[in-house]
Image (cartoon, rainbow, N blue to C red):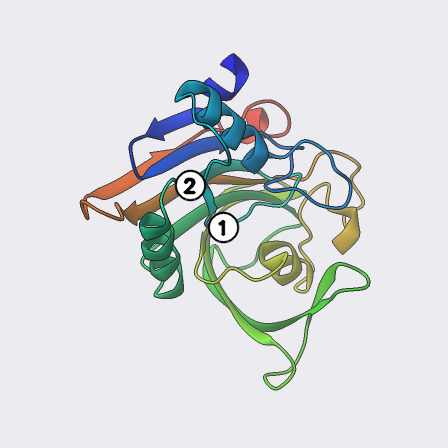
Amino acid sequence: MKQIQELILYEDNHMLVVHKPPGILSQGDETNDPNLLTLLKQYLKEKYQKPGNVYLGLIHRLDRMTGGVMVFAKTSKAASRLSASIRNRTFKKHYYAIVEGVMPEKVGQMVDYLRKDETEVKSYVTTVEGGKQALLSYRVLEQTEKAALVDIALETGRHHQIRVQFSSRGFPLMGDTLYGSSVKMPLALYAYKLEFLHPVTKESMAFEVKPQGKPWDDFLK
C-alpha cells in the first residue's frame, strides 16, 4: 500500500491523479500481470475499509511501457464529466518523446487517419474513409545529430497515435522496435502533464511529472 501511496499526486472525493511507472499495465488484460487500476482499487478498499467492490473509473489509458500522469474517477458522475472533457478536447495531454533523426520543422502539427489492426495490435496510417482522425502538435525542445526531444500536445487519443505518426514520417521513437526503431532500449515516451477542469468544482487543474533515468537525463537537465 505504501508503494501505491507514493504514486498518488492528488486525491479527493471525486478523483485520483497518479504517476504511472513505465512497465505496468493501466488495466488488466489476458496476461494477468499487475495493473494500476486493480492496485488502486485495493488501495482505496484498504484505506477506507470498504466492503465489497470499490468503484474506480478508468478515464484514459497509457501503453504499458509509457509512464506518466493518469487520472481515475472515484464516482460515476466524475467519470462521466471527465470522459466528456476528453471528447470535447478540453482535457489536455502533454508528452515528451525522443525521436530518431533530425526533425526539419521545429514546430508543427500532424494530421492523419489511423486504422488499428486488432490481430497485430498495431496501427497504420490509412485513408480518410478507412481510419479515424489523429491530431497532434509538437515542438522540438532539443536536437542532436541523431535524435530530438519533442514536446507533444495530443489532441486525439488513437491507439499508438504518437508512435505511428512520427514513425510514418521517418522519425520512430527511440526504443520503439514495433514501429521501426533500431535502438534497443525502453520506449522513449512519457505523459508528463495533464490539464483539465475538476469534474465537480470546475477548478483548473494541472499535474506534471519529470521522467527519470536514461535517456531522459541526457535531455532534461
Q: Are marks 2 and 1 in contact (CB under 8 Å)?
A: yes
How far across and down, in percent of the image, does residue 122 sit? 74, 60
Give residue 60's mark: 1
Within the image, what quadrant is residue 67 found in? top right
How far across and down, in percent of the image, does residue 15 sit? 35, 38
How far across and down, in percent of the image, does residue 190 sit? 54, 39
Compared with 164, 124 (above or below) is below
Give residue 71's mark: 2
Front residue of 35/93: it is 35
Give residue 94's mark: none
Compared with 66, 167 (above or below) is below
Q: Amino acid at mark 1?
A: His
Residue shown at 60% from the left, 22% from the top: 213
Within the image, what quadrant is residue 23 found in? top right
Residue shown at 79% from the left, 47% from the top: 177
Compared with 192, 6 (above or below) is above
Q: Amino acid at mark 2?
A: Val
Callout 1: few (<14), some (14-19), or many (20+) C-alpha neighbours within 10 Å? few
Callout 2: few (<14), some (14-19), or many (20+) C-alpha neighbours within 10 Å? many
Residue shown at 73% from the left, 41% from the top: 175
Q: Secondary structure at mark 1?
A: loop
Compared with 45, 102 (above or below) is below
Name the side, left or right, on which 114 lies relative to 16: right
